[in-house]
Amino acid sequence: MDIDKNLTRRKFLQASVAGLSFMYLPGIGRVKARPFGIMNAGNYYGRLCYNENPLGPSPFALDAMQQAASISNRYPDWYSSTLESDIATSHDLAPNNICAGTGATEVIRLIADAFLTVGDEVVSATPTYFQMAYEATANGASVIYVPVDENYVIDLDGISQAITPDTKLISLVNPNNPLPTCVHKTNMEAFINSLPSGIVVVVDEAYHHYIHTPDYKSCIRYVAEGLPVIVVRTFSKAYGLAGARIGYSAASSQYTNQIASSQMFAMVSNLGQAAAQAALNDTQHVTNTVTLNDQAKGILQDGFTNLGLDYIPSETNFIMFDTGTSASWVASELASRGFQVRTGWGMPQHIRVSTGLLEEMNEFIVALGEILGQDCRERKTPPTFGLNRIYPNPFNSQCTIKITSFSSEKVLLAIYDSAGRKVQTLVNQALTPGVHNITWDGRDVHGRRVASGVYIMNLLQGEFAKSAKITLIR
């Protein structure tokens, strides 16, 4: 079942002390049943850019994966039936309300494939997690972006006003990412109940377990009420199974059938299914994860305050803070000291930093203070991610796409036609940070000249995406 969100601060602090006693004091509590403890892979220290769980998976999940490894020669449960049944039970839903997939990533793609096609519209907030917008564009749909409000909260009134007769889907991330705020439950309820018929609301609740405010409530309740809502959850965050790749949707049986209709069978491995089933039963591990997260956030918040930096109050396992200067420069300097963070989203002074081990948090604040204390004359702004320019546009025989890579992560630049079919992949490799000029000669992957028309270019690097239209005239 879901963890109680109505804990008082006093009860939470008491749970924090109890939870951390076994994590840091050998021989106390359940430490013998949990030998893995906190992640000890040194090459992950300072990786504060992916909102991962530094506590690692539940030891029960680790045991389950080890047992499942012995039958890796066997195909898994083709349709994750047992896992879906266990997930459904945890939410008081029926198994046909759940579709499990290889992370929320696959589930979001399946939802886009099920509900979006050429000419459809998606309404989404900005900044927010990009994937639904990316998948919509790849399917030939268009995206309407509504800026968050002055408190960095998703503007539901603005989203309502942006709805048109072509709107088929509304994409919400609650709590949001990269802005770690959440929509209050009364506002969400009023919004859901006021929507025109024929519109599906997708709510990504990846960070659900970290919330403490009593003004929030999961949208899974709307599924039980039969409303046109799809909730996406993941085992990557609070359950610590990002590498096992398990996520799921909760929706009406009708919507679930649509979502699952294009899914390949046997996508979730034996190890992944076993890990998720075991993790569901280990509520203590989730409690310990949330406890560590709140202590880590406390260190960051105190550090930002001492450095005179503003930050956005967080309901997640990451914080956005204002550096007061070029965020990309600060991020580059942090990287040189072993700390990876995220910048972007049209917020040139803000950095998103994930919570980690308490030692990491303390050392991060020290490094940040040293960086901000440097002479301004020493500061050089590194490149930022972007699909900068396409020229000429329209074009006849060849065009140049000017892009910027901000790191050594792989870059994907693909072209789709107006029906959402992939035409050509121009880049699928790591590029050096900086500006790159990529050419397209108006041909598809088979070398054939494509027809005149409007095409979509999608640029992807890490968790950032940009799209742009280009017109080919023969």
Image: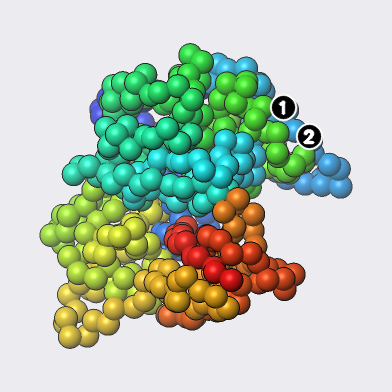
Q: Residues within 10 Å of mark 1 (few under 14, many from 20)?
A: some
Q: Earlier in the sequence, mark 1 or mark 2?
A: 2
**What kind of residue is marked 1?**
Thr
Q: Which residue shows up at 65% across the image and 66% down it?
A: 450
**Front position in the image: 255 or 174:** 255
**Front position in the image: 87 or 38:** 87
Left or right of residue 363, residue 453 in this image: right
Q: Position of residue 190 (x, y in %)?
A: 31, 21
* Above-or-below relation of 46 to 126: below
Q: Position of residue 297 (x, y in %)?
A: 30, 48
Q: Which residue is at the far front?
A: 474
Q: Residues within 10 Å of mark 2 (few under 14, many from 20)?
A: some
Quadrant in which residue 201 is drawn:
top left
Q: Which image quadrant: the C terminus? A: bottom right
Identify residue for label 2: 77
Quadrant in which residue 159 is drawn:
top left
Q: Can residue 276 be seen at all in this image of the molecule?
A: no
Identify residue for label 1: 82
- Mark 1: secondary structure: helix
Q: Which residue shows up at 21% across the image and 59% down it?
A: 322
- Mark 2: secondary structure: loop
Q: Which residue shows up at 33% across the image and 38% down it?
A: 162
Give the label on residue 413, or none. Answer: none
Residues at circles 1 and 2 in contact by the CB criterion of under 8 Å: yes
* Above-or-below relation of 212 to 464: above
